[in-house]
Image: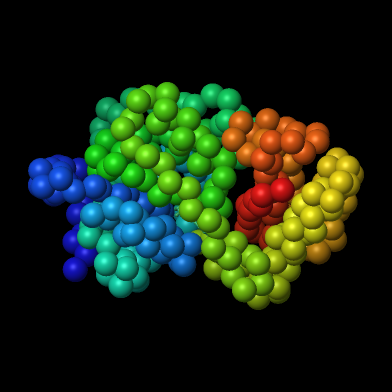
Amino acid sequence: MTEVIRSAAALRDRVAAWKRSGMLVGVVPTMGALHDGHLSLARAARGQSDRVIVTIFVNPMQFNNPEDLKKYPRTEAHDLALLEAEKVDVLFAPGPDEVYPEGFATKVSVAGVSAPMEGAFRPGHFDGVATVVTKLFGMTQAGRAFFGEKDWQQVQVVTRLVRDLNIPIRIIPCPTIREEDGLAMSSRNVRLTAAERKVAPALHATMQAAAEAIRGGAEPGVELAEARAAILAAGFSSVEYLDLRDAATLETVQTLGRPARMLVAAVLGEVRLIDNIAV
Ligand code: AMP
């Protein structure tokens, strides 16, 4: 049985009992509307920890767009059934007042890796992520945290954060889970119309082709410009960024040397999609 816990105090008691018997606790932070991407993290956590906590909290602080927050899908009863099937021990689903009680005044802000891409196009987003993740790590006292590579920049921000603040938790990045046609799974995909859903896989396919060309020696700048045009031609209304960056520092790279990552954010209909792949 997956136990649903909504207060930080009750969670602390539960975790303290586990830790007294020497158990390793794994946490998977999510915003709910769970899909196979999230469940792959729960499975990784199950395999690498004695007890698994999945958190569901639609964190208002990380939404720079109020409309996006309002429309974010919320499906807790269904989510709970999925977590039961994965043998998750605890679903921690606090309300906004439990996370941000009256008088809350602290913000965690990571410089550097937070600045470009998502940081530039969604001002305040990573402050919201860093703040809530710090709180969730404090509330769960977990020894391992599982994050999806789907949000590559987020993984780098969280990794930096735990190093900088000496938070005793290991960050475990897990591969992006995709639909059969290559579209990265996302809770926002349900907001695509049927016609847009057909266009959406062009994002990954175009990046794959560009990455292959760059690996084969093509000029990154030229390939990225062509890929950007191809994404627009496929039916996306805008490409916010399509960059080739150092996989860890997220600095722009002009030529391949160290591990690099191609990252994109593009808008299709009313939905903003992000993705990234190794180059
Ligand atoms: P979210 O609920 O969108 O905040 O995502 C919660 C966690 O699930 C984050 O660590 C995401 O990176 C991860 N995640 C979301 N989509 C996928 C996916 N398609 N494959 C792997 N992990 C994912």
Q: Position of residue 62 (x, y in %)?
A: 47, 41
Q: Is residue 14 left or right of residue 267?
A: left
Q: Is residue 177 left or right of residue 116?
A: left
Q: Position of residue 231 (x, y in %)?
A: 79, 57
Q: Which quadrant of the figure contains the N terminus?
A: bottom left
Residue drawn where x is 18% and y is 48% of the image: 23
Q: Is residue 95 left or right of residue 248?
A: left
Residue drawn where x is 80% and y is 58% of the image: 209
Q: Tag count in the figure?
A: 0
Q: Is residue 212 left or right of residue 142?
A: right
Q: Position of residue 161 (x, y in %)?
A: 44, 30
- Closer-to-camera residue (157/271): 157
Residue drawn where x is 80% and y is 34% of the image: 254
* Residue 57, visible in the rendered structure: no
Q: Is residue 89 above or below residue 158?
A: below
Q: Position of residue 150 (x, y in %)?
A: 56, 53
Residue drawn where x is 61% and y is 31% of the image: 249
Which image quarter: residue 107?
top left
- Closer-to-camera residue (149/2): 149
